[in-house]
Image (cartoon, rainbow, N blue to C red):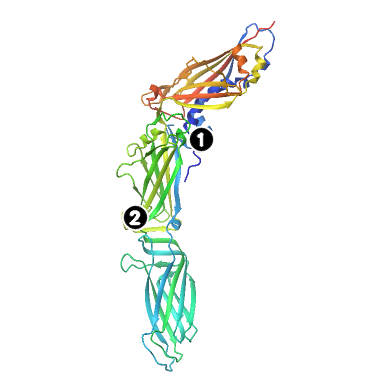
Amino acid sequence: MKMDKLKVSLRYLFFLLVTGIVAVSCIKDEIDLNKISDRIYWNPKLGIPVAYSSLSLDDLIESIDSEQMIKSDSNKFLTLVYNNRIFSNTAATIMKIGDQQFGEALIASQFNLPAYPTQNPIVFSKSNDYPFSMSHGEIIDSLFLKTGALSFNISSTYKHQGKLIIEIPKLKKNNKTFKDSILINKSDGTFSSIINFDVSGYVLALEHPNLTDNVMSCNYTAKLINSGAAVAAGDRISISIDFTNIAFSSLFGYLGNRQLINTLSEFSFPIFGDVSQPNLKLANPRIKVKSASSFGLPANIELYNVEAINTKDNVTIPLTFSPGTNPYNISFPKTIGGYAYDSTVYNKSTTNLFNALEIGPTKIKYGIRSFANPAGKALNYVTDSSKLTVDLDVELPLDLACSKIEFKDTMELDLSDVEDLEDKINSVLLRSSFENGMPVDLNLQVYFLNDAYQHVDTLFSQNSDNTIKSGELNQDGKVVKPTGKILDAQFSKTEIAKLKTVRNAIIKASIATAGGGSTYVKFYSDYRLKVTFGIQTELEIKE
């Protein structure tokens, strides 16, 4: 099954860190410069603090993570988790018992008997063992029937009336054996009838005379009332049985080495989807397989045909697993109605997941299967509501190194109102003061475009250093002190005049960890980026 709700990617987690700076290009919404008067100013330079923001990773997560895919542990360390519900089904769905058709049981005469007038009944008896057909080597001790129907197709060529008594000694309800008497009401040798019985709520104890088979025994007694007609050799009562609509409320015995799960699927993996190059290394990525079972039987789980695929570059890396780690056994509850919970983790010590993620995969394909009783015969139980659920999580602890991961986005930005300011302002200085408590260097540039998407100007000078250095790190890659940075964007009167043609903007941002991307850093939810925006204008003096 596909994961259709995976929205969280590096684009959202990192890009929002730096695009806060774009607010300086929208300052006009914070202060209405059209209201500047034409009167004389003795001090033509006016500085105004416009905005202050303190943005934590907690704030970002709350705004982008509606699916709650970013998890914070007790130390506030962050992990991005992609979850996929692989399988969830009940025993009633997995372990169906097919209809059973049992062949003829013959109560036949082997002799010619002359007609003779007597009132004594003619009695024939026979027992038959019917093998239950099972598909997976099951040896069923007890079958508690939620539903079931027995249909007896009976015919008689005896020229006598009478009755047929049917008994199934191991089929009981409320400790009472199934037994019924069927009237043979024709004496011309043409009796035929189909008799149906509802056996819902009964318990069938199957026998195992050969240790590996499943047998239902039936006893038949025919009591014929002598009509005075002869009995010919070959006269018979024929009986065939259809056992249909079989559904269990519970099963006990060995339930076979049957396959419980077998599925092939894939899920999108957008963490690399919006970056220009997969310049990202995760220190400890892992795959976690979790199961919850109320099946009273041992089972295993195996991953197979797992591949990391970069669809953009058409690159695929198969995932391999260390010997003895895949498949793995899961436990089961020892009491009916209980649950057993298991999980196993595959990391860079037991798989090549670390290397597979270096290609920047956009999706992961996988197969998963499970077999009951992998070690052989054992006593099992299930109820119809017993459930097996399996989840697969790809966990990406945000302990990572990255070298200049770049992002680009286009936005509408209408600065036509600037035309009204040309005769009032000589210059504008936009100042942004940062305290970077994040563990990455941040870099931003905004390109102003006209309505034909032609370049007009940039927010920061092309020669300026727009990099906001990461906070100071300790040896574990954790920020211990924020780093300060001031960024100025200055526009002369001529440049202000050009801005009136701006209708769009391209925002380019990049992040990198220390040492050109060689240093691994850790992300905690209480990391914070503080920004103060201010504006200074030099006004046109009018007498």
- As measured in the structure, the alpha-carbon distance from the residue carrying label 1 to the one carrying label 2 is 41 Å
Residue holding disc 1: 65
Which of 465/23 is in front?
A: 465
Q: Neighbour class for label 1 at 10 Å: few (<14), some, many (≥20)?
A: some
The percent position of residue 120, horizontal first and vertical second, equals 42, 90
**How many numbered marks does the figure carry?**
2
Q: Based on the displayed image, in which of its 4 quarters is residue 223 positioned?
A: bottom left
Residue that label 2 marks = 373
Residue 513 in percent (x, y) is at 41, 24
Q: Who's the residue at 58% across and 15% down the image?
A: 535
**Do the CB atoms of the residues marked 1 and 2 lie less than 8 Å apart?**
no
- Dot placed on the residue nearer the N-terminal end, 1 or 2: 1
Reply above or below: 535 against 312.
Answer: above
Tell me the SS state at disc 2.
loop
Q: Quadrant of residue 220?
A: bottom left
- Horizontally, is 423 left or right of 199 in the view? right
Picture layout, residue 276 above or below residue 334:
above
Residue sitting farthest toward the left: 323
> Camera-side residue: 506 or 270?
506
Q: Nearer the viewer, residue 7 or 37?
A: 7
Q: Quadrant of the image for the C terminus?
A: top right
The kind of residue on which mark 2 rests is Asn
Residue 332, percent from left and from top: 37, 52
Q: Is residue 57 left or right of residue 325?
A: right
Left or right, residue 386 beside residue 423:
left
For the question of whether residue 438 can be seen, the reply is: no
Mark 2 is surrounded, within 10 Å at the Cα level, by few (under 14), some (14 to 19) or many (20 or more) other residues, namely many
Q: Can residue 195 be spotted in the picture?
A: yes
The amino acid at mark 1 is: Asp
